[in-house]
Image (cartoon, rainbow, N blue to C red):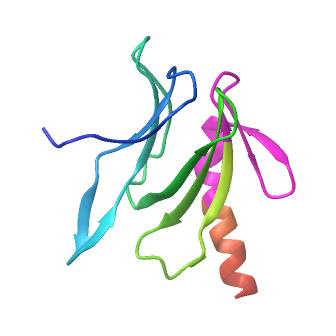
Amino acid sequence: MRDIEILSLSPDGRYQVQAIPWEAGNTHWVFPPQIIDPQNGIVVFGLEDHLWSTDRSTWLSPTRVELKLRKYPGDRARLGLAVIIECAEGTAEYGDGTHIDLARLESTLEGMLDLLDLLG
């Protein structure tokens, strides 16, 4: 079993952002995010593609966390993408304040990368 690293805890301790880091290259570590409700053993959010990495997680309230994400190897959207996850509602907010269901977030992030490539 690989070691889980807790990246941050919500202010009330109800949620945690965690990752199982893996070394993608010599000293290039990727931290695929998961948001967990450890009391209930529920994965609130996780990305299927383990090439997504969390650069930063900042709690804005006990249920809202902003994640700064990049996709390895980092040649697309070098500064990363920021999303706000509303854990209690199962939604995400990105860009100009657009709200979507967490089930659609990963495909939306991929679309944002594609758009940035076109504008590139």
Q: Horizontal placement of 104 versus 48: left or right?
A: right
Q: Nearer the viewer, residue 67 or 73?
A: 67
Q: Nearer the viewer, residue 21 or 117?
A: 21
Question: Which residue occupies 84% across, 48% down?
Answer: 98
> Residue 90: x percent and y percent?
66, 28
Q: Nearer the viewer, residue 110 or 1?
A: 1
Q: Horizontal placement of 40 versus 57: left or right?
A: left
Q: Which residues are magenta?
A: 85-109
Question: Which residue occupies 80% across, 41% down?
Answer: 99
> Residue 51: x percent and y percent?
40, 61
Q: Residue furthest front?
A: 11
Question: What is the quadrant of the N terminus in the image?
Answer: top left
Q: Horizontal placement of 90 versus 14: left or right?
A: right
Question: Which residue occupies 23% across, 75% down?
Answer: 27
> Residue 73: x percent and y percent?
41, 76
Identify whether 17 is placed above or below 13.
Answer: below
